[in-house]
Amino acid sequence: MPTLNVDGLIFTFPQTWQASKYDEWSFYRSGFARQGEGIKAVDVLAITDTNEAFLIEVKDYRHPDAEKPSQLPEAIATKVLHTLAAMLPAKLRANDDSERQLATAILACDSLSVIAHLEQPQNHRPIVDPADIKQKLRRLLRAVDAHPKVVSKSNLRGLNWTVT
C-alpha cells in the first residue's frame, strides 16, 4: 500500500492507488518552483484505480507553535492552481519516470477532488472553522472542484484512505 509521511501524519492509500508527496518532487523543487516567485505546491497527489485524482493539502495545528493562518483558503487555492499548472510540464519534462507517470495520470483523470486535511487541538477551541474553510474553498475553486472536502484523521468523510 502506498504510505506517505506528511508532517508526522501517516497517510495509507489502497494498494491499487498511486500516491506521492508532490512538494518533494525533484521536478517541482529543482525546476517548476524556480519559474517564478511564490510558486507553491500541495502536499500529496493521489490517483485511484478508477482515475479519480486527489490534491491533498495537510495542515496540523496540534503543535503548540502552530499559528492560525489568516488566509488559509486562499493559500490552499493557490497551491492547487500552481500544482495543476505544473502537471503538463511535468508530464513532458520531468526527469524522474515516476513523477512523469503520475503527472500523465493526473492529466488523464476522469475527476478531480481537492482535500484540505486539517488536524486541530482536541482540548482547546478549534484554530480554524472547517465549515468556513470549506465554503471559501468552494468559492475559490469552483471551476476545479465545486465540492472540496475538509477532513481530519478522525473524520475522513468517506474517503478511502487512513491517516494515523
Image: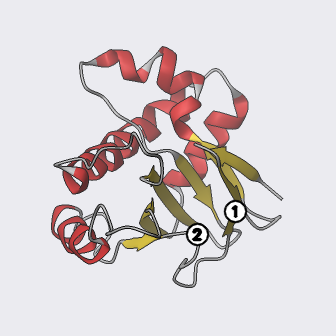
* Quadrant for the N terminus in the image: bottom right
Q: Position of residue 63 (x, y in %)?
A: 47, 47
* Quarter of image, res 33: top left
Identify which residue, 12 or 65, lies in the foreground.
Answer: 65
Pointer 2 or 1: first along the chain: 2
Identify which residue, 158 or 130, lies in the foreground.
Answer: 130
Q: Position of residue 155 (x, y in %)?
A: 53, 79
What is the secondary structure assignment of the residue under circle 1?
loop
Callout 1 environment at 10 Å: few (<14), some (14 to 19), or many (20+)? Answer: few
Which amino acid is tagged 1?
A: Thr
Q: Residue at x 44, y 31 (%)?
A: 89
Q: What residue sits right under mark 1 in the picture?
A: 164
Q: Position of residue 138 (x, y in %)?
A: 23, 71
Identify which residue, 69 or 135, lies in the foreground.
Answer: 69
Q: Residue at x 30, y 63 (%)?
A: 144
Q: What residue sits right under mark 2 in the picture?
A: 153
The colour scheme is secondary structure
* Quarter of image, res 94: top right
Q: Residue at x 51, y 34 (%)?
A: 23
* Quadrant for the C terminus in the image: bottom right
Asked whether the beta carbons under mark 2 and mark 1 sit within 8 Å of each other, the answer is yes
Callout 2 environment at 10 Å: few (<14), some (14 to 19), or many (20+)? Answer: some
Q: Is residue 150 visible?
A: yes
Which amino acid is tagged 2?
A: Lys
How far apart are labels 2 and 1 at the CA level? 7 Å
Q: Is residue 93 visible?
A: no
Q: Residue at x 24, y 63 (%)?
A: 141
Q: Is residue 103 left or right of residue 39?
A: right
What is the secondary structure assignment of the residue under circle 2?
loop
